[in-house]
Image (cartoon, rainbow, N blue to C red):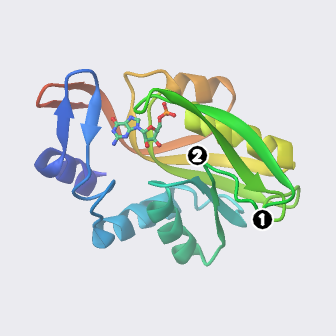
Amino acid sequence: MKLLKDRILKDGKSFDGGILKVDSFINHQMDPVLMKAIAAEFVKRFSDLNINKIITIEASGIAPAIMVGLELNLPVVFVKKAKPKTMADFYASQVYSYTKDRTYDVCVSSQFLNENDNVIFIDDFLANGNAALGVKDLIKQSGANLLGMGFIIEKSFQEGRERLLDQNIRIESLVRLKWLGDDLIEFVD
Ligand code: 5GP
């Protein structure tokens, strides 16, 4: 997606160790016009699927997911990183965060995900695939059907892509990064 590549080159900041900062347009301040274009691209790429629900994980997945939900007129469920006291029946799993270097619990209410659902998962980044695999576990527990996963940015030099493909998960990444160095951003292709 050229628009996104250009924006990453213009406003992204990369660090040695493989971290890309995109907090001026995705992760902190957000650009809704770019998000709308991102959602349109996801909708195009998943247009062959019969989806009835979008699933994402808080916090940074919510913005792109809700834009996709708006385009498709479908509900969006976000997986929570803390269980609200009022949530009675839920599925739970654990996720290791690469950027925060800690493990956290994730959960989703059984009220909003069940065996009648055909879902796609949308998130901002695919790195080692831990968040995606945690959500996949929740989807499996609920009996819902996972049709694909869409990421705004895939760090192809980390193992997430292989781990998801090993589990036969369809992946659509709008931009794939070959390498990130100090002030160096290289794309796949
Ligand atoms: P994974 O679970 O695939 O290892 O990591 C995915 C999650 O970690 C994403 O949801 C994202 O929030 C965060 N993440 C991983 N790498 C980066 C990065 O380089 N930059 C930013 N901003 N977030 C990242």
Displayed-image quarter of ligand 1: top left
Task: Kindly identify the amino acid type of the residue bearing the numbered disc 2.
Answer: Met
Q: Quadrant of residue 171?
A: top right
User: Where 99 falls versus 181 (above or below)?
Assistant: below
Q: Which residue is mark 2?
A: 149
Q: Looking at the figure, which quarter contains the C terminus?
A: top left
**25 left or right, relative to 124:** left
**84 left or right, relative to 37:** right
Q: Tell me how far mark 1 sits from mark 2, CA to CA.
A: 29 Å
Task: Kindly identify the amino acid type of the residue bearing the numbered disc 1.
Answer: Thr
- Give the residue at x 88% y 55%: 115
Q: Nearest the camera: 36 or 132?
A: 132
Q: Which residue is mark 1?
A: 86
Q: Position of residue 187 (x, y in %)?
A: 25, 33
Q: Nearest the camera: 55 or 176?
A: 55
Q: Quadrant of residue 135?
A: top right
Q: Earlier in the sequence, mark 1 or mark 2?
A: 1
- Give the residue at x 48% y 55%: 59
**46 left or right, relative to 182:** right
- On the question of residue 179 being in view, the answer is yes
**34 left or right, relative to 123:** left
Q: Secondary structure at mark 2?
A: strand
- On the question of residue 189 being in view, the answer is no
Q: Secondary structure at mark 1?
A: loop
Q: Position of residue 176 (x, y in %)?
A: 35, 36
Q: Confirm if mark 2 falls within 8 A of ligand 1.
A: no
Q: Nearest the camera: 71 or 12?
A: 12
- Give the residue at x 58% y 62%: 47
